[in-house]
Amino acid sequence: VLAAVPAAVVVVWSVWAAAVLLVVPVAVALFFRDPERTSPVDPSLVLAPADGKVMHAGPASGPHGPAGEWLQVIIFLSPLDVHINRAPVGGTVTSVSYRPGSFRPAYHHDAAANERSEMWIDHGGVTVVVRQIVGMLARRVVCRLTPGQTIAAGERIGLMKFGSRMDVFLPMTATLTV
């Protein structure tokens, strides 16, 4: 009877290990999915750069925004959302920067101090600022833009890994419709 105990433990452990070895790759594949999207062709629109929940749409607040007065849209991406980021507008990339920072939860109001990439886009003479901000789980952003590059609205611009947020800063003259 005692000889059967180790065999039973091995069988139970093997079932759990097999389940984990099956679930983890499926979860990672779902997380990094990259569905095709068709963007509207109206150049007056500003598209959402990421899937997720809009947490704020209105005047920018706090000390972490670009200098000046802006409207800000904050989108929180849960681990279940698509994490490929897309250009909210077409235009010419004028600046790309990386800033190290903390790793607070991306849905927290202090997440603007987290590690991030920031892209400035000249959209026909109007500046739009886009930020990829890491969260507690997301410890890495991938920005695929370079200064001088011309991009189209909806074009892939990078990705964030495992829960994060996107901020878009627009001129005060923009009309927000979320």
Image (spheres, helix red, strand yellow):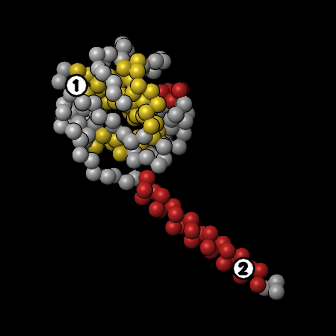
Query: In the displayed structure, does residue 162 sit left or right of residue 153?
Result: right
Q: Nearer the viewer, residue 137 or 154?
A: 154
What's the amino acid at mark 2? Ala
Query: In the displayed structure, does residue 79 sit left or right of residue 128?
Result: right
Residue 39 in view in this figure: yes
Residue at which label 1 appears: 122
Q: Nearer the viewer, residue 45 or 162?
A: 45
Which quadrant is the N terminus positioned in?
bottom right
Q: Secondary structure at mark 1?
A: strand
Q: CA distance from mark 2 to mark 1?
A: 65 Å
Which quadrant is the C terminus positioned in?
top left
Where is residue 120 shown, x and y percent of the image?
Answer: 29, 27
Tell me what residue is drawn at x 46 percent, y 31 percent: 55
Q: Quadrant of residue 60?
A: top left
Tell me what residue is drawn at x 39 percent, y 23 percent: 72
Contact, CB < 8 Å: mark 2 with mark 1?
A: no
Query: In the displayed structure, does residue 86 sit left or right of residue 151?
Result: right
Where is residue 165 shown, x and y percent of the image?
Answer: 44, 36
Q: Mark 2 or mark 1: which comes first in sequence?
A: 2
What's the amino acid at mark 1? Asp
Residue at which label 2 appears: 8
Packing grade of label 2 (10 A; few <14, some 14-19, many >=20) is few
Where is residue 129 shown, x and y percent of the image?
Answer: 32, 26
Tell me what residue is drawn at x 21 percent, y 27 percent: 44
Residue 97 in view in this figure: no
Packing grade of label 1 (10 A; few <14, some 14-19, many >=20) is some
Q: Is residue 9 above or below residue 161?
A: below
Q: Nearer the viewer, residue 58 or 87?
A: 58
